[in-house]
Amino acid sequence: MKSLLSFFARAKKMAAQGKKVLGFTLTSPEFEPPAQLKKYAASAYKYSFPYLPAGGDFQLRQRIADFYSRSWGKKFNQDNVFVGAGGKEVIFVLLSTLLEQGKQGQEVIIVSPYWATYPKVVDILGGKKVFIRTSDKNNFALDVDKIEKAITKKTKTVIINTPGNPSGQIIPEDKIRKLAFLAKKKDVIILFDEVYEAYDYEGLFVSALKHFNKNVFCVFSASKSFSLCGWRVGWGIGDKELVKKMINIQSEITTSPNAISQLALKELFSKPKQIQEYLVSINKKAKMRRNLAVRLFKKNKVDFVYIQGGIAIFVKIPDSFKNAFSFAEKLLEEQKVSVAPGEFFGWKNYFRMNLASSPKNIREGIKRIANYYK
């Protein structure tokens, strides 16, 4: 199967040829980043030439720890925090730490639908993927009992995503609590990918950090929270000994993430009130786009999964198509609309559409998509 980025590149190539393509393939927020970051980045320039420590700038790590300590009522310090080149590197380094090199049969449990990167990373690291399939009949609700039954002595980690990409579902707190308890009970690391923490439209999101123990590891991202995809900074919070092992691995890969990005974010995290105000503002903008998409898809009698959080909507393909790849390719060629085929997420009869775009583009995109449902 092609990668999601290769599908995105095809749409970009068409746009470069002068074709007016509406791009909804990648979940890249098109909101303005926090305004003060321009000033912080300019101030950081002259201090950004040397290497920063592996694992991230010490002050940045402490300020991240302080921010999440206040948010979720637990006490973290810099030793709990790992900073990577985006949430993707945090996940890669964590899995590199947990999967022993050259050892066969090490299992990683992945809930489907899933972010396309999870199985790819497991394959790269030689792990064995164990998929837990949910059902679109109940909006892909998570069954904790299924996860518990799937855990074996070979299980190295379980990957949980909330708010979900691509499903847009938020796992309720009672299940988050059960998962955290399960991680401790089974002595297995559960990776909670929470990069869409800022996008909660129903007031349902509770981070697993609220129920933190040494087997809980949470991942966050400046790409999604601050609309800084190109800055490549993400962070994870977990057990100190686990973070120490991750730092040892990162030091031999990237050394540390982009210095200017880290130093600018260090200043931003010194002002938690500014962060909260920004997060409220982008959640409001994103919710408006969610409501717009829901209204238009309903109007055109298109089936979709109601989105509780995140910035993408999972939409059922027309009955006349056998799979999402064939639909997405036809949509791109005929209507100049680029979406992500559901095969990348484990569901061939759905496609994912990014909603962190302009309302104008969303309206026009859904108008073109709806042509296939008439």
Image (cartoon, rainbow, N blue to C red):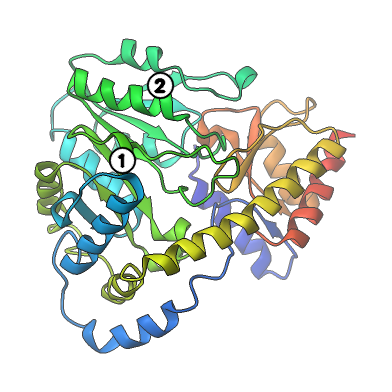
Q: Which amino acid does label 1 sit on?
A: Leu
Q: What is the crowding at mark 1: few (fewer than 14 residues within 10 Å), some, or many (at least 20)?
A: many
Whether residue 72 is visible to the viewer of this picture, yes or no, is yes
121 on left or right of 166: left
Question: Which one is nearer the viewer's eye here, 58 or 65?
Answer: 65
* Residue ID at (59%, 64%): 30
Task: Identify the image quadrant of the C terminus.
Answer: top right
Residue at which label 1 appears: 209
Q: In which quarter of the image is residue 39?
A: bottom left
Q: Which amino acid does label 2 sit on?
A: Phe
Q: How far apart are marks 2 and 1 (CA)?
A: 24 Å
207 on left or right of 46: right
Q: In this view, does 325 lie above or below 183?
A: below
347 on left or right of 267: right
Question: Which one is nearer the viewer's eye here, 42 or 35?
Answer: 35
Question: Which one is nearer the viewer's eye here, 245 or 269?
Answer: 269
Q: Which of marks 2 and 1 is in front?
A: 1
Q: How many labels does the image show?
A: 2
42 on left or right of 215: right
Q: Is residue 138 above or below residue 366?
A: above
Can you give x and y, in whole percent of width and height, for residue 301 in the image?
84, 32
Residue at which label 2 appears: 131
* Residue ID at (65%, 27%): 349
Label 2: element kind = strand
Q: In this view, does 93 lie above or below 318?
A: below
Whichever of labels 2 and 1 marks the residue nearer the N terminus, that label is: 2
Can you give x and y, in whole percent of width and height, for residue 319 in the image?
78, 25
Label 1: element kind = helix
Disc ID at residue 191: none
* Residue ID at (52%, 37%): 204
Can you give x and y, in whole percent of width and height, for residue 358 in the image?
70, 62
Can you give x and y, in whole percent of width and height, for residue 20 in the image?
75, 65
